[in-house]
Amino acid sequence: MGKKQSNQVKEITPMEVDFPQWYTDVISKTEMVDYSPVKGFMVIRPYGYAIWELIQKAYDKRFKETGHENMYFPLLIPESLLKKEAEHVEGFAPEVAWVTHGGDKELGERLAVRPTSETIICSMYSKWLNSYRQLPFLYNQWCNVVRWEKTTRPFLRTSEFLWQEGHTLHETAEEAQAETMQMLGIYREIAETCLAMPMVVGQKSEKEKFAGADATYTMEALMHDGQALQSGTSHNLGQHFTKAFDITYLDRNNEQSYPYHTSWGVSTRLIGGIIMVHGDDNGLVLPPMIAPIQVVVIPVAQHKEGVLDKAWEIGKILEKEYRVKVDDSDGYSPGWKFNQWEMKGVPIRLEIGPRDIENGQCVLARRDTGEKIQVSLEDVLKAVGDLLKEIQSNLYDKALKMREEKTSTAENTDEFKKNLKENPGFIKAMWCGERSCEDEIKEDTGASIRCIPFDDEQEVLYEGKCVCCGKPAKKMAYFARAY
C-alpha cells in the first residue's frame, strides 16, 4: 500500500506538458471533486467544499455589511414566467433543463430548473413592493443553478454549480448603477485580498453582456495557461424585468413607477480559478485565507518517545488562532506525508522530531516557495501568523507578475495573432465598437473581448485605430481566449 500511495503523489502531469490534464489530476488527486453518475454534474468532496465555505463566508460578510439580506427562492420556475422577458429567455433557452412530470402525472405546464432566478424573484417582488418607502430591496440567495452544458470541466463549467445571486430594486437609475458598481468592487476586493487573485475589471461588450441587461460588468482573472476566467459579474438590468413583471410602486409624487433592478453573482468557478492561478507541478497552492488547513503538523520519528505528545501540544497552541491538522497517521513515512500535504496546497508544514524537541525548535516549510525556516517553539504562534500573512501577499504578487508578463498590446490582427501564439494571455487593443470586428477576431483567433476597462484605466494605443479594421477606435479592450 505504501508504494502505491507514494506513486500517487507523483502522478500529476506537468502543466507545461498538458495543462488540462494537469488540472484534472490536481482536482482528483487532492480529493476536491469527483464525477457523478450524471454527466456534467460534479460531487464536491469535503476538501473542495471547505474551500467554498471559506469563500462564501468572506463574501457573505461583505454583503451583510452593505445591508443585504439572504433569502431563498424555489428551484423550479413555470415556463410562462421564464418567457416574460424575451431577451432573457432567448439567452438561456438552449441550456434550460425542464421538468415535465410530477411522479407519473404529466404537468399542465413545464417547469424550468432555474438557470438563474431573475424571473421567479421578480414575480415575488411584484407582490411585495407597494411604496417607495420599502425601497431599496437588497436581497441575495445562496443556491444551485442548472445550465445544460455541452462540454464540462469540474468547477470551471458544470451543468450544475453553486453560487450566490443578489437581486436588488432601487428608486432611481443612479442608485441602481451605484449598487451595480459597489458589488463589482466587493467581488474584486475579496478575490484580491482573500483569494490572492488579481482582477481586471470593466464592462462587457453588447455581445458578451447578460441576456436582458442594460449593462454587464465583470472581473476577469488570467490563468497559468494564458486563458482568462470570468470570475464574477454584476448586471444593471434597468427596468427590463420590472416592466415585464409589472413591478410598480407609488413613488414620492404619488404616481405609479417602475423600480430599477440589479443582479450579481459569483460561483464555485472561483475554486477553478484559485487552482489555475496559484497551482504548480506539485499540486495545489492555497492562499492561507481560504485554505481549509493552514498549518499541518508532521511528527518526524513519531514512534520515539515524546514526539507525538509535542506535536499535539504545538497543534493545540496553533489551533487557537489557525486551522490546523496534526498528521499522526500510521504506516506512512514523513516524506510521503510531506508530498501529500504539499499536493493538497497547505500553506505551512510544521516538522517536529526528537532533535528539534531537544533544541526547543521546529521547522516551518512554506508551500509557496519551498523555503524552510527554523523557529523557536516559544515563538511558534507569532512565527506562523507572520508567515501566513507573507505567503498570502506573496501569492498575490506572484499572480500579478504572471499576469503582467502575459499581457501584451497589439496594433493589428497580424500582431494580435503573433502575441496569442507566442505569449498567450491578455491582449490590450483598440476597438471601433463594431460587432463585426469583435466577431471577426473571435472567428479568426478564438479570443473574445473580456472587458472594456473603465475610463480611469483606458489607454489610447497606436493612434487609436481599431486592431481589426484600422478605423478610428472608441475604446481600448482586453481580449483573451477564455474558459
Image (cartoon, rainbow, N blue to C red):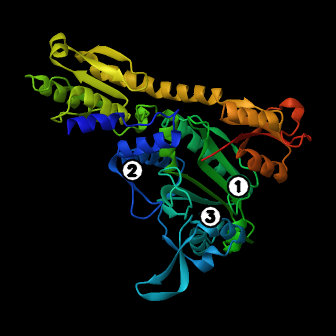
Residue 282 in view here: yes
Q: Which residue, as the protein is rendered here, is positioned at the far right? A: 471
Residue 378 occupies quadrant: top left
Percent x, y of residue 309: 12, 27
- Give the residue drawn at x 57%, y 71%: 120
Mark 3 is on which residue type?
Arg
Q: In the image, is residue 105 above or below residue 286?
A: below
Tell me the SS state at disc 1.
loop
User: 183 left or right of 86?
Assistant: left
Mark 1 is on which residue type?
Lys
Tell me the SS state at disc 3.
helix
Percent x, y of residue 439: 78, 52
Residue corresponding to mark 1? 209
- Given residues 129 and 351, the one toward you in this image is 351
Percent x, y of residue 18: 51, 38
Residues tagged 2 and 1 counted as in contact (Cβ below 8 A): no
Q: In the image, is residue 148 above or below residue 16?
A: below
User: 192 left or right of 360?
Assistant: right
Of circles 1 and 3, which is in front? 1
Q: In the image, is residue 290 above or below residue 117?
A: above
- Given residues 314 and 284, the one toward you in this image is 284
Residue 465 occupies quadrant: top right
Residue corresponding to mark 3? 133
- Give the residue drawn at x 61%, y 76%: 81
Mark 2 is on which residue type?
Val
What numbered label is drawn on residue 33? 2
